[in-house]
Structures are given as C-alpha cells and as structure tokens.
Image (tube, helix red, strand yellow):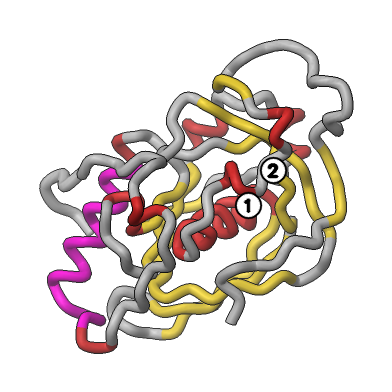
Amino acid sequence: MAGAPLARDIVTAGSVVLREPADEVPDSMLGTQELRDLVQSMIDTMRAAPGVGLAAPQIGVPLQIIVLEDKPEYLAAVAPELAEQQQRMPFEALVVINPRLRTLSDAGARFYEGCLSVPGYQALVERYISVEVEGLTVEGLPVRLQANGWQARILQHECDHLAGVLYVDRMLSRSFAARGAAGRLPQGVPAPGACRCCHPIDRAG
C-alpha cells in the first residue's frame, strides 16, 4: 500500500456520521482501486494522527471498514509494567472489511482509552480481553483473527464506531479527564485492571 500520502481530516464528535450505523461495503467495491485508495487514506490518516486504529466513519465515510496498527515506537512511550498489564504487543497494519466481532470469554480489563474523534480526553473503559473478528480483505478474501489484550481493545473500539458508538458511551464517566492529567481517581471509580464484562458487542455476527 505504498504511494503518496493521502491523509484526510478526522471527523470529531458532534458529526452525525459518527452516530449512525455504517453500511456494508458492497461486493461490487471489493478489489477495486477505489477501495484500495480509501483504505490507504485511512492508514495514512491513522499514522499521521498518530493513532492505533481508525474506522471509515472517522473520515466521513459511512462504510464498514477498520484499520489498526500498533508500532514499536508507540510502545516505547508506555511504561513496561503498564504495557505488560495491558497485554500490549506491536503488530503491523491490519485491514478488515465488514467485520463481525464476537467475544471468546467474559473476562475483561479496565484501562484508559482515548479516541481521535474525541481529541484531548481519556477515560476508563471496560473491554473484553479476548475476541475474534471475521471479515474480508480489500480484495474480498475471507479473514479471521483472534486477538487478546490491547489488540482486542482496539478491535472493539473500532467496531463500535461502525455501530455509531463512541467510547464515551461505554466509559466510567467519573474517570473522564483531559489526556495526560495526573492525580488519583475520584472516589468510587475502580482502579485500572482486570474486570468482568457484560456489555453487548455491537458488531457481532
């Protein structure tokens, strides 16, 4: 997916496209240059931000497409003990068209999460730690991936976007704060770490 940078502006909260379910990518679009260019734009936009994931609605395109990537240099800015707790490992760029997500257990984890469409803020969000996603490649070939830890969190976050759901809909609201804000958690807010999840996966097939 080499070529000239094609980064686009990121749509922020308040835009209707972020609050409506995205449409399936039609069979007629699979394997086309139009789709390849769109996916490249998403990857370039994600990297320019920089971020670890992006859904097509975040660039104003209401289609079921997600991209994700976690580079070693991103992990370099994370304390090793936190990266271990989050089960965070680098991985190369992944693209899933028309993803369908399911949980593999009810085990979860509670960690701070942000979003390129809600810039400058973060909050604790409970996510399943083990999921499976099925979908298609850009060329229309089937793809299936089992993910754990931070990669599973990214998948859930991006698939939420395809259902018109933002992380602020799932956050522990009293933990909502400016990104990087130091200080202890407010009374009644549980500490980051293991938990049990029970919320539905909106993009389940």
Indicate which disc residue 125 carries.
Answer: 2
The secondary element bearing badge 1 is classed as helix
Q: Position of residue 72 (x, y in %)?
A: 50, 37
Residue 47 sits in quarter: top left
Q: Gap between marks 1 and 2, in whole Å?
A: 9 Å
Q: Residue furthest top?
A: 183
Q: Position of residue 152 (x, y in %)?
A: 63, 57
Q: Is residue 20 visible?
A: yes
Which amino acid type corresponds to the residue marked 1 in the rendered image? Arg
Classified by dominant secondary structure, the portion drawn in magenta counts as: helix
Q: Position of residue 112 (x, y in %)?
A: 66, 34
- Residue drawn where x is 53% and y is 55% of the image: 165
Which amino acid type corresponds to the residue marked 2 in the rendered image? Val
Quadrant of the image containing the N terminus: bottom left
Q: Is residue 93 visible?
A: no
- Residue drawn where x is 37% and y is 66% of the image: 65
Residue 21 sits in quarter: bottom left
Observer-nearest residue: 115 or 4? 115
Q: Which residues are magenta?
A: 29-46
* Sequence order check, earlier mark of 1 and 2: 2
Observer-nearest residue: 29 or 12? 12
Observer-nearest residue: 61 or 144? 61
How packed mark 2 is, by other alpha carbons closer than 10 Å (few <14, some 14-19, many 20 or more), is many
Residue 202 sits in quarter: bottom right
How packed mark 1 is, by other alpha carbons closer than 10 Å (few <14, some 14-19, many 20 or more), is many
- Residue drawn where x is 54% and y is 76% of the image: 100
The residue labelled by disc 1 is 153
Q: Nearer the viewer, mark 1 or mark 2?
A: 2
CB atoms at circles 1 and 2 under 8 Å apart? yes
**As drawn, is 36 to the left or to the right of 121?**
left
- Residue drawn where x is 44% and y is 84% of the image: 142
